Image (cartoon, rainbow, N blue to C red):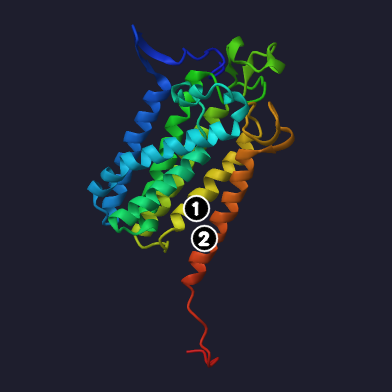
Amino acid sequence: MPLLSVFSSPGPLVFQLGPVSLRWYGLLIATAVLVGLALAMRLGRRRNIDPALIADLLPILVIGAVLGARLYYVLLEWRQYSGHWSDALAIWRGGIAIHGALIGGSLALVLFCRWRRQAFWPLLDVLVPAVALGQGIGRWGNFFNSEAFGLPTDLPWKLTIPWENRPALFLNQTTFHPTFLYESLWNLGVCALLLLLFRQANRGRIQLPPGALSCVYLMAYSTGRVWIEGLRLDPLCLVGLPPFCEGGLRMAQLMSLLLIGLGGAGLWWLLDRRRPLPDPSGVTP
């Protein structure tokens, strides 16, 4: 039996009582934040980082990430919001970009570390597994909003999309790639990889200098995003026109390739620094 095709999204609302409503998107993001906080605090203890410090960081990090994610999305979709700028504040309808969240969150972390006189890289290393876990949870918000799906497919795990949420070119198609699910599973795999490396480093089985785990996250997450983004029907376009950025570039793929290069270069530099310098005398001890 198909996993998802027998179901369509139950809709974006958990419940509504008069003017008060609770949306799955917001509920899942809040869940992702709280679960990520618990994981980051647990990892922080193992690196002698005060859990209270991470708790103090949380609101600053969330504000920076949300503002960055929304601003990034709105700037790249300015045609949609031009003349309707009040809609740019309606974040509960969806429309955030993870690369914007990473940029905004990183800037918030830099400011926090300067304010609290903390080392940036050790703190980031205990945060990235929590970020990957949070991404894996938060992606399910796309399911309830019937968004972030991919090309039409008849695979067993196909996802039924309501008519009103389908792109104009595919109104006669019913089932699509659940790209939100692909990315959720990929992110959970990235989290598992980071936790394994973290555990092995803590036990002394491998050596990871500060910042190495963050570089692995950039490379691992971005590798998955490159191919998953190629399936999506709602890419943010650097240039070109939706739905396929015809004649242009998909912004998420470009950013992912840049992050893979940045993470790889950073990892090489960090590991290369740990190699012993050659003896200038040329004499082997």
Tell me residue 184's x, y (percent). Answer: 49, 33
Which mark sits nearer the N-terminus, 1 or 2? 1
Q: Nearer the viewer, residue 226 or 240?
A: 240
Tell me residue 174's x, y (percent). Answer: 64, 13
Quadrant where the N terminus sits is top right
Disc 2 secondary structure class: helix
Whole-number angstrom distance, CA of label 1 to CA of label 2: 7 Å
Horizontally, residue 277 falls left or right of residue 198, namely right
Instruction: Pick out the residue farthest to the front.
Output: 83
Residue depicted at x 50% and y 31%: 96
Q: Which residue is mark 1?
A: 216
Residue depicted at x 26% and y 57%: 48
Instruction: Pick out the residue farthest to the top.
Output: 18
Tell me residue 269's x, y (percent). Answer: 52, 66
Number of numbered callouts drawn: 2
Confirm whether residue 174 shows in the render: yes
Confirm whether residue 185 shows in the render: no
Mark identifier at residue 267: 2
Horizontally, residue 36 falls left or right of residue 163, namely left
**What amino acid is labelled 2 in the image?**
Leu
Tell me residue 222's x, y (percent). Answer: 56, 44
Disc 1 secondary structure class: helix
Residue depicted at x 37% and y 51%: 111
Question: Does the residue at mark 1 contact the one at mark 2 (Cβ under 8 Å)?
Answer: yes
Residue depicted at x 33% and y 45%: 40
Is 17 situated above or below 275?
A: above
